[in-house]
Image: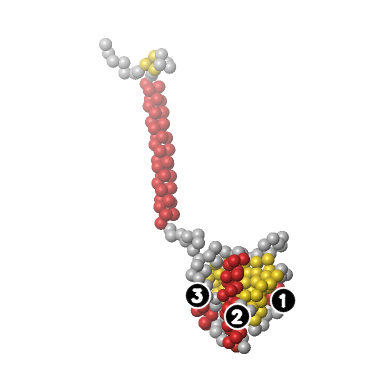
């Protein structure tokens, strides 16, 4: 018996015509091409994603606790002798870092300033600013126009205490501050660190203020 060249289609219950066979093959071919296109697109996206991941992994990124180290002692040496008092250079443990140090002269308020930005061991900030022949207006600006809540004496140096941690005002970084006057210098410590770290810094600064006062007294 001769072989039937056209298969019987179940849905039709009869052999398909040449035209139906051609349409079926064309549809099958089109479906195949669409699947190939989708697959190729997926492969391309996966390859691109893999390349992006490789690039991201290769790009060096700083660690969260990385701090730019500034040698404020060396910077202070460059400005030595330009102000009526020596520039304060606190000798702190190695877990204290400095990210900025500047001698600011010819300022708008006509008060020269020696500034050191410090990052404490707890990764908090304390700014130390030494104003020369400063006035009350300058001091008020340094402590966010807050009033002292007490005082303490360290190595013979009296410090006024400013505590803005519970303040409803926007005081920026001046969450807590200490100020002291010695010779021609008014020193302000301000920042976000805890009281213990402020006390540690005040101890070191007080030693230098007392030593300088004795030397120039």
Instruction: Give the residue at mark 3.
Output: 71
**In percent of the image, x 60 and y 69: which residue is there?**
198
The residue nearer to you, when weighing 40 against 216, is 216
The residue nearer to you, when weighing 134 against 61, is 134
Q: Nearer the viewer, mark 2 or mark 1?
A: 2
Instruction: Give the residue at mark 2.
Output: 209
- Quadrant in which the N terminus is drawn: top left
Q: Residue furthest left?
A: 1
Residue 93, percent across and down? 50, 71
Q: Nearer the viewer, mark 2 or mark 3?
A: 2
- Mark 3 vs mark 1, CA separation in Å: 30 Å
2 or 1: tag closer to the N-terminus: 1
**Can residue 147 be seen in the rendering of this structure?**
yes
Please state if 52 lies on the left or on the right of 134 as rendered.
left
**In percent of the image, x 43 and y 60: which residue is there?**
60
Please give the label number shown on residue 137: 1
Residue 20, percent across and down? 40, 22
Q: Is residue 10 above or below residue 130?
A: above
Q: Residue furthest top?
A: 1
């Amino acid at each position: 018996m001769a072989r039937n060249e056209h298969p019987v289609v179940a849905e039709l219950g009869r052999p398909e015509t040449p035209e139906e066979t051609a349409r079926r093959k064309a549809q099958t071919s089109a479906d195949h091409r669409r699947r190939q296109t989708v697959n190729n697109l997926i492969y391309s996206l996966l390859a691109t994603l893999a390349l992006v991941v490789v690039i991201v992994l290769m790009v060096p990124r700083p660690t969260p606790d990385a701090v730019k180290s500034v040698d404020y002692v060396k910077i202070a040496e460059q400005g030595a002798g330009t102000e009526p008092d020596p520039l304060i250079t606190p000798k702190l443990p190695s877990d204290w870092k400095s990210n900025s140090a500047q001698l600011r002269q010819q300022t708008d308020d006509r008060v020269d300033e020696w500034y050191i930005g410090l990052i404490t061991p707890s990764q908090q900030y304390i700014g130390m600013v030494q104003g020369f022949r400063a006035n009350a207006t300058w001091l008020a600006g340094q402590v966010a126009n807050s009033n002292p809540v007490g005082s303490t004496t360290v190595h013979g140096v009296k410090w006024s205490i400013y505590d803005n941690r519970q303040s409803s005002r926007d005081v920026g970084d001046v969450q807590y501050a200490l100020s002291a006057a010695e010779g021609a210098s008014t020193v302000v410590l301000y920042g976000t660190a805890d009281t213990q770290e402020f006390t540690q810094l005040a101890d070191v600064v007080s030693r230098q203020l007392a030593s300088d006062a004795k030397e120039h007294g």
